[in-house]
Amino acid sequence: MKTIQEKDNAFVWHPFTHQLQADAPIQLVKGEGIYFTDDKGQTYMDAISSWWVNLHGHCHPYISEKVSEQLHQLEHSIFSDYTHQPAVDLAERLLKHLPVNQSKIFYSDNGSTAVEVALKMAIQYASNRGQERHTFIAFENAYHGDTFGGMSVGARNVFNQAFQHFLFEVCYLPLPSTENIEEIKTTLLLYLKTKSVAGFIFEPLVQGAAGMLMYEAEHLDALLRICKQHQIICIADEVMTGFGRTGQFFASDYLSETPDIICLSKGLTGGYMPLGVTSCASFIYEAYLSNDKTKTFFHGHSYTANATACSAALASLDLMETELTWQHIKRIEAQHQQFVVELQTKTNYENVRCRGTILAMDIPSHEERHYLNTSGNTVAKWFQQHGILLRPLGNVIYVIPPYCITEIELNRVYECLLAFDKTLTN
């Protein structure tokens, strides 16, 4: 009788995994709160919210109950010419939290697709108004997903090097800082003079897959002001930063300038089910209102606005809107800030940083700082042996816990980070 791991090796292809060097995967059999339990009874603290999707803990009884109720009422339906209450309620409630200029919600099924929808919205917006705009502006080191549009506006790197010849033109800007903001503004203006730019897409304040690179709202605001003066659509990719991760409901809440389009996924359903959202300002939607059917936004998915996923998102929103959740978020943020001081003064870690519930640090390395840095596997295995699930981005360690993590449990993660630091000097 073959084990699950043996069957997995025979039949399954895992994401972002070097198959020839991969260890046998751990078989998880249960999730509860911040913990996973494997088939041998070993528990693991999920310190990265399972790729940043889990907000409130695994198998949260309230979300599970609401999903179960929905499954017994309406699990899914076609969403063209039909609607249902979970999708309408979710759209209404999301718009109450999004910047005031957002007016419409378009549903898809993951973060990459939410970005793809945004790019298509921006391009066809120009086309519907008789303009030919085919270029996007993005930040260096960006990651916006694995669809072809998402890859195109992302950095040219190991994630997409096999597809370089199929990706469309993008103008890249360095991540802004006090030292380079004026130079970047000058470069941006040069790009805009070409009259070919359809939009500017960015991960607000934190570039996740790039290694939790952080920058300031004031510098992003300066670039957004220039784009708006030239009527360039601004797209905020909040797939990772949304729903409290940066200490505000959305990272865009730190901005004075409002994005025209916002992409959401990951934490949207509390980590329960795939769901994507692309919201937009009214002027974008209005460009599609025409008796000319060729101006229709011809985009959709079989599982658009899946009723069960929408019910999970509504339940997660219920929890996000409680005072208790925000007490947890602010406490995690305060703990991170206090721990950063200790890491900066007493450890070998470099570039220690935090924003909201996101804590990150670099391991000193002679290799290039990127996803393929070999220290990542060593770190992941060491923490796994100590009962903590981390998945470093190369030599970048980060912690993004579910909000239900207690002060004691988070201190346990910190203790392991300090213990691992000692191995760097031995």
Image (cartoon, rainbow, N blue to C red):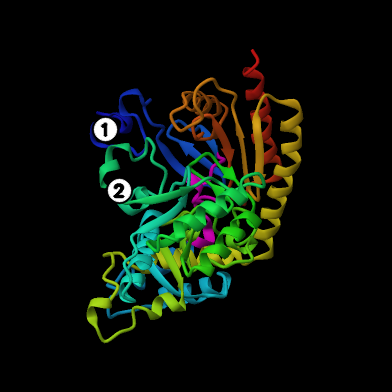
Residue drawn at point x = 54 percent, y = 20 percent: 366
Disc 1 element: helix
Q: Is residue 252 magenta?
A: no
| Image quarter of residue 339 | top right
Q: For mark 2, what is the residue?
A: 167
- Viewer-proximal residue among 295 and 408: 295
> Which label number is shown at residue 260?
none
Q: Identify which residue is drawn at 58% across, 48% down.
A: 183
**Mark 2 and mark 1 residues within 8 Å of each other at the beta carbon:** no
Q: Indicate left or right for 297 with 317 as reference.
A: left
* Residue 249 point in image, percent of width and height: 60, 62
- Residue 378: horizontal and vertical position, in percent? 50, 23
| Front residue (pair 40, 333) | 333
Q: Is residue 406 above or below residue 1?
A: below
Q: Is residue 227 above or below residue 60?
A: below
Q: Distance from label 2 to label 1 (Cα)? A: 36 Å
Residue appearing at x 45%, y 69% in the figure: 279
Mark number, residue 7:
1
- Mark 2 against mark 1, which lies toward the viewer? 2
Q: Quadrant of residue 155?
A: top left
Give, as a single range, the part of the protein colored magenta: 46-63
Neighbor class of circle 2 (other Cα within 10 Å; few <14, some 14-19, many 20+) is: some
* Left or right: residue 47 compared with residue 247: left
